Amino acid sequence: MCCCVRFLVAICVTVFVCVFCPKAQAADKAPPRNVLLYVTDDQGTDDAGCYGHPVIKTPGLDMLAKEGTRFTRAYCTTSSCSASRSVILTGMHNHATGHYGHMHRQHHFSALDNVKSLPMLLKQAGYRTAVFGKHHVAPDTVFPFDLIVRGREIKPRNPINMAKRAEEFITADKRQPFFLMFCTSEPHRPFSRKGFEHYSAEDVIVPPYLPDTPECREELAQYYASTERADSGLVELMKILKATGNWDNTLVVYVSDNGIPFPGAKTTVYEPGVRLPCVIRDPQAKRKGVVTDAMVTWADLTPTILDWTRAMPKTPWFHGRSLMPVLDQEHPEGWDEIYLSHTFHEITTYYPMRAVRSGRYKCILNVAHQLPYPFASDLYASKTWQGVLRRGDKTYSPRTVDAYVHRPRYELYDLETDPWEAHNLASDPAHAKTLATLQAKLKKWQKETKDPWAVKYRYE
């Protein structure tokens, strides 16, 4: 009798839980934790409405910022498309992965075979993975997306149509979570403006790091329109996420791969080349519209996404760290130092730079300072730079042309008093102690991250 009673009691408890405790059932059927990683191509410093730009209209990013966290001190680690994306997708500096520069055509850079990437780790965790547009990394064995849809396959080619095409992937399987990397070709040169051709040279505001010339104004007007075009894809994707019931279970991460495509920004480690927009929306966050001054880099993005998806390796090897703990903090402690590493853009533009920003100071090491600074082909051909050459201008705001092309081994800047890095303090005796401290930090970091160029301290 006792055994029968126990059996009947167990059945009653089970029935009670199933009927009256639906949360117990739901726990076994938790919604998928999806990820949308939205990457624009060459969107520069503060070039969005939510970052205070008075002209450029970015309703998609503005809405995302109201729903999430906007970073004011976010940095790519290398201001070059391919190399930067390799950092985004591995959580490691490109000098450690071997993806030193562009992967396409004759440039032929790619990650080492033993590198473990974000799509690889998410696939192992049961995720469907896709990249739409320009992902620009190699080889596919290291970055094994289930689906790759290149921008040129979308006709007519634009971010809105690409987003509509991505809906098929988003809704393909509701039982399996997805990771979608969405990469616009805008606002890269040549500037794509169709549908947004409403700016003239008189409309633009020339930032302090660019020259106020007719050529620069003309190109900035085109850049404004192309930036707005890039934002249109985000607007469409957010509509799709809401319409398909995925808005409340999808982490949205928005970044640009590198700085604005003008000399003085892209391919440099100066602020306009590396300080970029970054907005993250955690659908489960209690606070919205947070603005944080945590100093972060794109090496932090892979750890953040793995943290959110609960796919973090037991023994992480990343150079970055998860941003999840600081999404609700305006001024978090311990987030005031970052490192940068750039070596190539194209195979012909060898110019390794390493930099540390610690608090208000930035120290740059120009490893090959004996060489003239090389230009990316699209930047050299720009009307802005060609105008400088044609007129024989001596200055390229905020520095001289000669200072831009010929650089010393070390540069030191106080970014509080000199935000556009016009006054190099490396030879100033009053800043000798600061320089020595940052030099030591840089050297230590290079060795810790297995930077091949650390050998230069020994042999040169």
Image (spheres, rainbow, N blue to C red):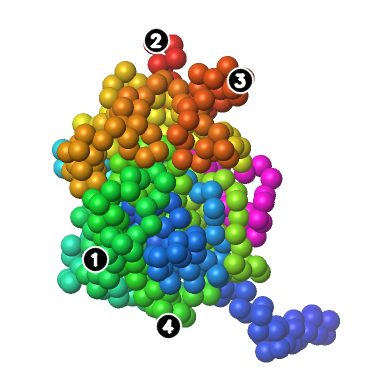
**Amino acid at circle 3:** Ala
User: What residue sits 55% from the left and 70% below the top?
Assistant: 67
Q: Earlier in the sequence, mark 3 or mark 1?
A: 1
Where does residue 165 sit, x and y in percent of width and height?
27, 73
Q: State the residue position of label 1.
A: 193
The amino acid pointed to by label 4 is: Ala
- Residue 159 appears at what percent x and percent y? 29, 68
| SS class, disc 3 | helix
Per the rendered image, the range of residues in magenta is: 315-335
Q: Is residue 41 above or below residue 232?
A: above
> Between 223 and 345, which is closer to the camera in this rendering?
223
- Location of residue 452 by image quarter: top left
**Residue drawn at x 28%, y 48% as measured from the top left:** 213
Is disc 3 surrounded by few (<14), some (14 to 19) or many (20+) residues within 10 Å? few
In the drawing, what numbered circle is on residue 430?
Answer: 3
| Mark 4 Cα shell of 10 Å, populated few (<14), some (14-19), many (≥20) | few
**Mark 1 closeness class: few <14, some 14–19, many ≥20 residues within 10 Å:** many
Residue at 29%, 32% (x, y): give it.
394
Q: Could you say whether the residue bearing mark 2 is in a helix, strand or loop? A: helix
Disc on the earlier residue, 1 or 4: 1
Q: Quick one: label 4 or label 3, which is nearer the N terminus?
A: 4
Magenta span dominant secondary structure? loop
Q: Give how far apart the Cα atoms at labels 3 and 1 are.
A: 49 Å
Q: Amino acid at mark 1?
A: Arg
The residue most toward the top is 459
| Residue 168 sits inside the magenta stretch | no
Distance between the Cα atoms at labels 2 and 1? Answer: 49 Å
Using the image, determine if residue 255 lies above or below residue 137: below
Give the numbered dot on residue 243: 4
